[in-house]
Amino acid sequence: MVDRRAEAVAALSAQLGHDFADPGLLERALTHPSVGEGSGRDTSGRPVHDNQRLEFLGDRVLGLLVAERLMLADPDADEGRMSARLHGLVDKPACARVAERLAVGPALRLSPGESKQGGRRREGALGDAMEAILAAVFLDGGLDAARLVFERAWADEFDAPASLSLINPKSALQEWSLGRGLGLPAYQITARSGSDHAPTFTVEVSVSTLSPLTAQGRSRQEAEKAAATGLLKREGVI
């Protein structure tokens, strides 16, 4: 009998271009939390180690690699522009698109119920697994190995032109809110912490009757851009 998932895992490993010294790391990265279904054990009674902890680590590894790439690619870009671009390269939709190109879905380990409900195509499951895979490569081979996988896997994301919402999220939010008769967005600093030479600003953005959203940044401008990006994402604009 053909083990289609085993074939999918082998194909994924080849796509990644990383030969795992510990294949168990890749298996864990592909294990959805539904497998334990709250009991922490699979249908055979064996302990289940899902990909949530790896996802946590992978999110940080991805952020570092994207920031490094942006710094090298455009030495003249300011912090605000790089921050906006970074958001669009590390968010869940971007990770899910990368996972789809690598055919992560067929390789996922899901509970029967989650699989029947289309879990292999869910953006959240794919995005989480992609971050976990990057963490697995990092733990198995170090940052250089993770960088090699990242450079291949995210190449199409970097090649795609950045949308206005990522280049100038405040302008994009203003156009969107005015186009819907919601008026102009309003920004307010709600907190400032840290030292004078390295402050952190917390900014709240509000648009008409929508719930306000807060975000942080190393400058007022960066925090406002982060807040605008967050509101656009929350409302499904980007």
Image: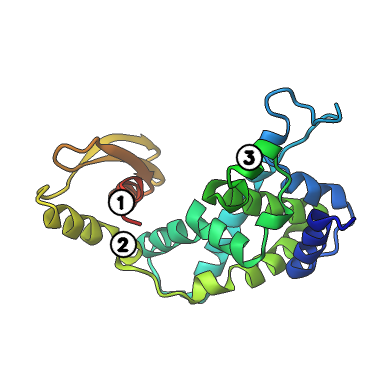
Label at residue 165: 2
The amino acid marked with disc number 1 is Leu
Residue in the image at 44% along x and 56% along y: 87
* Label 1 environment density (alpha carbons within 10 Å; few <14, some 14–19, many ≥20): many
Residue 176 placement (x, y as % from top left): 20, 57
The amino acid marked with disc number 2 is Ser
C-alpha span from label 2 to label 1: 8 Å
Locate the C terminus by quadrant: bottom left
| Labels 2 and 1 touching (C-beta < 8 A) | yes
* Label 3 environment density (alpha carbons within 10 Å; few <14, some 14–19, many ≥20): some
C-alpha span from label 1 to label 3: 29 Å
Sequence-earlier tag: 1 or 3: 3
Residue 213 placement (x, y as % from top left): 29, 39
**Vertical arrangement, residue 194 with respect to residue 65, above or below:** above
Residue in the image at 58% along x and 68% along y: 154
Sequence-earlier tag: 3 or 2: 3
**Vertical arrangement, residue 103 with respect to residue 132, above or below:** below
**Vertical arrangement, residue 32 with respect to residue 226, above or below:** above
**Vertical arrangement, residue 34 with respect to residue 79, above or below:** above
Q: Residue at the far top: name it.
A: 39
The amino acid marked with disc number 3 is Glu
Q: Which residue is mark 1?
A: 232
